[in-house]
Amino acid sequence: MPDARIRHAIYKTFAEGGIPRTATLCKQLRLQEPEVRSAMDRLDAAHSIVLDPRTREPWMAPPFSSVPTPFTVEGGGRSWFAPCAWDAFGIPSLVGVDAVISTTCPDCEGRIVYRLEGGRLADPHGVVHFGVPAAKWWDDIGST
Amino acid sequence: MHVWSAQSETPIGEIMPASNLWFLSRSWYEGRLTFDWKPRSREASQQLLSDAGFVGAFWTLAD
């Protein structure tokens, strides 16, 4: 099964600042569309990636998001959207770049910025709110 | 945050320092870009949470 190849290609595309799409994966890996879609369904079921429930295209490969979110990460000449604060913090070390994370406080609507420099969180400050208990994260991962 | 919670009708869950979350995120996603990455066991994930200070019933993962 090509699952590992497809998962790796999805993550590599995200890491390079791109958005993985089924058609591109087919071409890149020289696989037929049904084969790629079946593999992505299995990866989704295993919580390795998350497919858009409507289009069945890659939606999230944590910590990356294929759609705009309130959490942006910029570094190494690339930029990404992260599904949540947790994921935003994970991108710079995963990709291996210094980065600036930006979001907006839902309470005061002020801009929040974190800088990741040399593998360290510069000027640690602030708190993060978690609304969903860990046992229920995968009940509706899009809302988590 | 409690004002936001009341106005948005969002119950307060858990509030953690951002520095703890950064510490957790680094280890949580380690290795995801490698070809041979495999999902961690529930126990290994629970340990990562615990190591970063995320302990208690709220942070107990599903079986």
Image (tube, coloured by chain):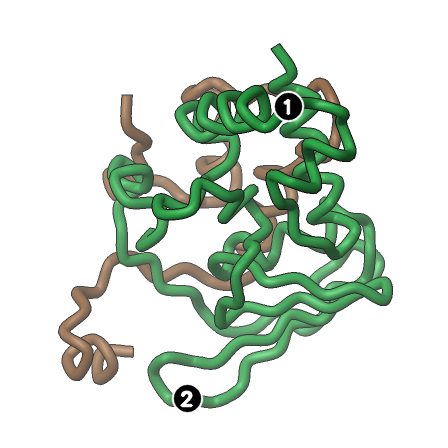
Label 2 neighbour load within 10 Å: few <14, some 14-19, many 20+: few
- State the quadrant of the N terminus of chain A: top right
* Percent of width and height locating residue A139: 25, 39
Q: In the image, which lettered chain appears green?
A: A
Q: In the image, which lettered chain appears brown?
A: B
Query: Residue B43, located in which quarter of the rendered image?
Result: top left
Front of the two marks 2 and 1: 1
Task: Give me the residue at 79% from left, 65% from top.
Answer: A75
Identity, as a three-letter code, of the amino acid under mark 1: Gln
Above or below for A127 versus A43: below
Q: Can residue B47 be seen in this view?
A: no
* Left or right of B2, for residue A130: right
Dot 1 falls on which chain? A
Q: Kindly identify which numbered label has been placed on residue A5.
A: none
Task: Give me the residue at 55% from left, 44% from top.
Answer: A62
Q: Name the residue under label 1.
A: A32
Q: Mark 2 points at which residue?
A: A109
Q: Gap in Å between the C-alphas at discs 2 and 1?
A: 46 Å
